[in-house]
Each structure stands twice: as structure tokens, then as C-alpha cells.
Image (cartoon, helix red, strand yellow):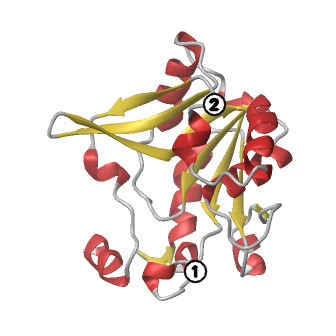
Amino acid sequence: MYIPRDLISGLVLSGGRGQRMGGADKGLQPFKGAPMAMHTIMRLEPQVDMVRVNANRNLAAYESLGVAVIPDVIGDFAGPLAGFQAGLEACEHPYLVTVPCDSPRFPSDLVEKLSEALLIQDLDIAFAATLEDGEVMSHPVFCLMKSSVITSLTTFLGGGGRKIDQWFKLNKTAPVVFDDLAAFANINTHEELRSLQK
């Protein structure tokens, strides 16, 4: 029981300031011979009908990766939820899945598992999680959502809300646990990038 991929838009989130990387645009950092965002795009494309990138600078560089680029609707680098909003406003499908640009090894069955949970549990949003020492660790930027949540998200952002977990509480959401901890490792610093390259 899965949502067909032709009903799902994909969005790579690359709209942050990259502060822990000295202000570098993380998605454009070279990783194994290509920009990190390119690896993410290629991993997501087989799982969805189409992929866009959410970015707020270097738009031409992202467009050169062969995908449409959409900046945040609200300014001042307002965080992942602003990227969600931009993706939902551009979304032509009933569902949108988001992944960050700095985790190029996320599971190849990410969308399949999230869609199964969303359908079976009748959710608005299903998001990835892992078990670490018996505790559920959420990875909320890896999420599949109904495009209809745009209404609640726009209201939340309009009221000054910026935290994903607070917005999630306003919708029917649930975590989907994945086995591979390393798959969700994200790259925040140049050191982490060099380490993952090896």
C-alpha cells in the first residue's frame, strides 16, 4: 500500500545560511566529484515524479543541476518551514516529500516507507526517525506531507512560528522508524564533509 510516485513532488532543502560551514552554501560543496545537492537530487529522483530545489542564493548554480529552483516566500532565511512553504506553493501533486541537501545517503526506500505509513495511519505528515539507544530520534526534515497542509503552515508562519515540531503538533503526524542510523547523517561542517568523503 503505497502512494504512486507520480502523485509526489520532491523538494531538496538548500535554503539555509550554512553558518556552521562558515557561511558556505552547503548544497554546492563538492562531495565525491559533484555538488552535494546533486547527489541528493539523484537519490530522490527515482522515488518521486519530479524534483525541485529550495535555495535562497546561487540560484543559477542550482539551476545548472537540471532542476527548477524556488526561493523562500518569506525572507531572512526563515528555516526549513519556509522551504516547506515554498515547495507546497509550487507543488502540483497531492503530496510533497522533503529532504535536506546535506544528507546525501538517505534511504532509497524513504518515500515508499513514508507513504505506506501516511496511508495506513491516515496521516497529514509522516517523517523519518531512527532508534538510538532505545530512544526515537526524529529527522523531521525528511518528511512526506499532503499538499493540503499549506493552509495550516501559512497560518503558523504568519503568526511567527518557525519550529517544525510545534507545527507538526497542529497536524496528524507520526514518525517512521528506519534501521540505518548512518543514512540520516548530515554534513554541517567542512570536517564532517571530509570525513564522509572517506
Instruction: Name the residue beneath numbered marker 2.
Output: 170
Rendered position, 121 above or below 13: above
**Residue 60: percent from left, percent from top:** 78, 79
The CA span between labels 2 and 1 is 31 Å
In the image, 41 versus 174, the foreground residue is: 174
The C terminus appears in which quarter of the rendering? bottom left
| Helix, strand or loop under label 1 | loop
Visible residue check, residue 25:
yes
| Residue furthest to the left | 133
113 relative position to 189: left or right: right
Q: Which amino acid does label 1 sit on?
A: Asp
Q: Name the residue under label 1.
A: 25
Q: Within the image, what quadrant is residue 138 found in? A: top left
Q: Is residue 14 above or below residue 179?
A: below
34 shown above or below 84 = below
Tell which of 123 and 28 is nearer to you. 123
Residue 182's x, y, as percent? 27, 52
At which x and y percent is residue 146?
70, 29
